[in-house]
Image (cartoon, helix red, strand yellow):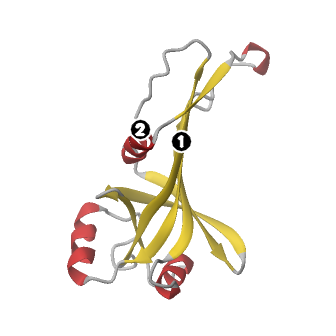
């Protein structure tokens, strides 16, 4: 649709429960963390586990090193996922800010390995990082006057 034909949009803030439901409806997101004092973004796949976001990574990954070195609370990260139609610009976006910790318990790591298959070859992706949400925000982008339904 040409920009001159774009319809008016409405932005609706999502509550915590709806934002987390939408986040759980997709498997792809982006993790944002600090590397050498600068923000770094990586696309990753995820699964929700007991209200937390869990991703798989490898031992040498920058995020793994930071999550391992963080204090008991972990390191602060942001996690974003969305479904936005490239033509209409309608959809939703959720951003979670929280603490990431490396999963070190062998039983928990084994359970997570069964829940989430990594994109990379399995032998390379042997670590997991758990993100405990502290701040959850989300927006629904819909047509002005639309019903405001969420998909996902």
**Mark linked to residue 138:** 1
Depth order, front residue of 117/39 = 39
Q: Is residue 120 above or below residue 50?
A: below
Of all residues shown, which one is farthest toward the bottom? 69
Name which residue lies at 45% across and 23% down. Answer: 149
Percent position (x, y) of residue 110?
22, 75
Q: Are marks 2 and 1 in contact (CB under 8 Å)?
A: yes
Q: How far, Cα to Cα, is label 2 from label 1?
A: 8 Å
Percent position (x, y) of residue 58?
44, 79
Of all residues shown, which one is farthest toward the right? 4
- Tell me the crowding category of disc 2: few under 14, some 14 to 19, or many 20 or more residues within 10 angstroms, Cα based: some
Secondary structure at badge 2 equals helix
Name which residue lies at 68% across and 15% down. Answer: 7
Secondary structure at badge 1 equals strand
Name which residue lies at 42% across and 64% down. Answer: 132
Which residue bears the numbered disc 2?
A: 18
Q: Earlier in the sequence, mark 2 or mark 1?
A: 2
Name which residue lies at 58% across and 12% down. Answer: 145
Q: Is residue 117 above or below residue 147?
A: below
């Amino acid at each position: 649709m040409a920009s001159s034909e774009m319809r008016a949009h409405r932005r609706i803030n999502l509550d915590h429960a709806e934002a987390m439901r939408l986040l759980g409806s997709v498997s792809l997101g982006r993790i944002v963390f600090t590397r050498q004092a600068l923000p770094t973004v990586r696309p990753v796949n995820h699964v929700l586990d007991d209200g937390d976001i869990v991703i798989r990574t490898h031992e040498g990954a920058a995020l793994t090193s930071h999550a391992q070195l963080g204090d008991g609370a972990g390191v602060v990260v942001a996690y974003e996922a969305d479904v936005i139609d490239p033509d209409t610009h309608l959809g939703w976006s959720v951003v979670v800010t929280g603490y990431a910790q490396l999963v070190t318990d062998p039983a928990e790591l084994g359970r997570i390995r069964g829940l989430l298959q990594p994109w990379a070859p399995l032998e390379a992706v042997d670590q997991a990082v758990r993100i405990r949400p502290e701040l959850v925000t989300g927006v629904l982008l819909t047509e002005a006057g639309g019903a405001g339904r969420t998909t996902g």
